[in-house]
Amino acid sequence: MNSVGRPEIGQWYLHQDKGEMFRVTGLDDESRTIEIQNFDGDIDEIDAESWDTLPLERAAEPEDWTGPVDDVEVDDLGYSATEMRGADWEAPLQPFGTQPEAWQDETPEEERDAEGEGTPAEGLALDEPTAAQRLR
């Protein structure tokens, strides 16, 4: 006989020879089975006679037991990831400053070239004839 006694719904157990944790999710008196859910989410059942012979021990609830459960909301976990206090809710919000993107030109608009092309580095040679003019 195992040392844990009768199964309790919601209690976590460790199957000692397999090293697997499971939670009892239901008891069916009519079929004399114990419904369980393994930590990885698999659902199974154990008959009552087998329960008494299994090497089991009670286990603490895993820190993150939500892995196999799809419909758990953050509020159901009983803790807040932000750890906010009442005073935090009363403080006014502080807006984030706008940060310019790397591609944005920080030069004031009135100082920019109207065509947005800038000034050529070598300057313009207006007095020199073009290649086509020299051929004439």
Image (spheres, grey):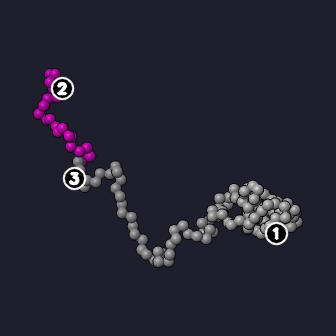
Question: Bounds of the magenta span?
Answer: 114-136
Q: Quick check: can you spot residue 94? A: yes
Residues 41 and 18: in front is 18
Q: Residue furthest top?
A: 135
Q: Is residue 83 left or right of residue 6?
A: left
Question: Disc 3 on helix, strand or loop?
Answer: helix
Q: Nearer the observer, disc 2 or disc 1?
A: 1
**Residue 15, position in %: x, y?**
76, 59
Residues 42 and 56: in front is 56
Give the residue number, with chain letter if any, for mark 1.
6
Looking at the image, which residue is at 13% across and 31% down?
Answer: 128
Chain-order first, disc 1 or disc 3: 1
Which image quarter: residue 30? bottom right
As shown in the figure, which amino acid type bears the numbered disc 3?
Glu
Q: Around disc 1, counting alpha carbons within 10 Å, would you say few (fewer than 14), some (14 to 19), or many (20 or more)? A: few
Mark 1 and mark 3 in contact? Answer it, CB < 8 Å. Answer: no
Chain-order first, disc 2 or disc 1: 1
Q: Is residue 63 left or right of residue 128?
A: right
Chain-order first, disc 3 or disc 2: 3
Instruction: Specify the label residue 111 is tagged with.
Output: 3
Q: Is residue 92 left or right of residue 106?
A: right
Looking at the image, which residue is at 48% across and 75% down?
Answer: 89
**Residue 106, position in %: x, y?**
28, 54
Which image quarter: residue 70? bottom right
Give the residue number, with chain letter if any, for mark 2.
131
Q: CA distance from mark 3 to mark 2?
A: 34 Å
Q: Quadrant of the N terminus?
A: bottom right
Q: CA distance from mark 1 to mark 3?
A: 83 Å
